[in-house]
Structure formats: C-alpha cells, structure tokens
Image (tube, helix red, strand yellow):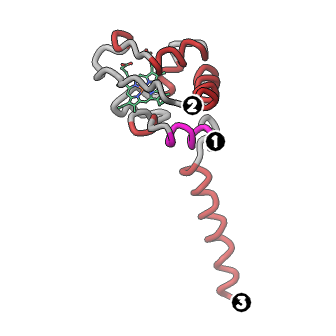
Amino acid sequence: MKKHLLFFPVALLLASFTTVGGSDPRLPSDIKALLDKNGCGACHNLDRKLVGPSWTDISKRKYSAKRITQLVAKPEPANWPGYVPMVAQPSVPKDEMTKIANWLSKLQ
Ligand code: HEC
C-alpha cells in the first residue's frame, strides 16, 4: 500500500518534467520533426544561438513564408554578420518547406 502512495506523486512529477523539457508550445512536435529530419536542428535552436541564429531571432525579421523559403534555398549571409554563411538547403521537400516557413513566419 505504501508503495502505491509513493508511485503517484513520482509519476506526476515525471509527467510534468517531460512536458516542460520535451516540448515547447511554440515549437509543435510535427514541426520539430521536420526540422530534425531536414538537418535544420543541427544549426538552429528555438531560443539559443547555435551555428545559426535562433528561430526566435530569425522570426524578429518578420519575413513572409515565401521569403523564408527563398532564403533557405538561397541564403544571403550578409543578413547575419558575425555568423558563418548558411549552406543552401535546396533539397527540402516542398510541402515540408511550406510547413516550416509558415510556422517560422508566425513564430513570436
Ligand atoms: C550547417 C548549419 C545550418 C543548417 C544545417 C541550417 N542552417 Fe539556417 N542558418 C545557418 C546560419 C549560420 C545562418 C546565418 C547566416 C546566413 O544566413 O547565411 C542561417 C540562417 C537561416 C535563416 C535566416 C536567413 C536570413 O537571411 O535571414 C533561416 C530562415 C534559416 N537559416 C532556416 C534554416 C532551415 C529551414 C534549415 C533546414 C532546412 C536550416 N536553416 C539549416 C546555419 C544553418
């Protein structure tokens, strides 16, 4: 009986940790999967600068989804002084790039 009483709070604690650490409402899991699949996650993080600027920093530029798609296929490194130039990513499947671009253009 005692064991059962202990199990519940621990399970609740673990559940809340996975929510906080595992997914941010600003980065839905289907988008995160696309970013990881297409290699974007290696250089970009939601809030932290990695090799490339964070998604939230990019979103401050207020690009349209169309402009984002153009910049990913043909980066313009002059837009980000102090960063290494991004390697062009022309082979992201069109429907996936559309989803990523729509998400990024609305991110705050
Ligand atoms: C090898 C590292 C790397 C990968 C992989 C990468 N990026 Fe980047 N990205 C960068 C860097 C560095 C910059 C800033 C310099 C630049 O724009 O050239 C950048 C800039 C950007 C910008 C801003 C462009 C601008 O001109 O303001 C967008 C949007 C972007 N990346 C999206 C993506 C997406 C989407 C993917 C995946 C398909 C991706 N990146 C993959 C490194 C990377």
Q: Which mark is residue 50?
A: none
Query: Quick one: SS at disc 2?
Result: loop
Question: Mostly what secondary structure, the magenta segment?
Answer: helix
- Mark pair 1, 3: CA separation: 41 Å
- The percent coordinates of residue 25 (x first, y second) are 64, 39
- The percent coordinates of residue 4 (x first, y second) are 69, 83
Query: Which residue is under mark 2?
Result: 93
Query: Quick one: SS at disc 1?
Result: helix
Query: Which residue is under mark 1?
Result: 30
- The percent coordinates of residue 38 (x first, y second) are 49, 37
Query: Quick one: SS at disc 3?
Result: loop
Q: Which mark is residue 1?
A: 3
- The percent coordinates of residue 23 (x first, y second) are 59, 46
Pointer 2 residue Cβ closer than 8 Å to ligand 1: no
Q: Which residues are magenta?
A: 29-37
Identify residue type, mark 2: Pro
Q: Nearer the viewer, residue 25 or 41?
A: 41
* Mark 3 vs 2, N-terminal side: 3
> Residue drawn at (41%, 16%), measured in percent from left and top?
75
The picture quadrant for ligand 1 comes to top left
* Mark 1 vs 2, N-terminal side: 1
Q: Nearer the viewer, residue 7 or 44?
A: 44
Q: Are marks 1 and 3 in contact (CB under 8 Å)?
A: no
* Mark 1 vs 3, N-terminal side: 3
Q: Which quarter shows the N terminus?
A: bottom right
Q: Nearer the viewer, mark 1 or mark 3?
A: 1
Identify residue type, mark 1: Asp
> Residue drawn at (39%, 34%), measured in percent from left and top?
43
Say whether residue 83 is magenta: no
Q: Could you classify mark 3 by the number of other residues whose Cα lies within 10 Å: few (under 14), some (14-19), or many (20 or more)?
A: few
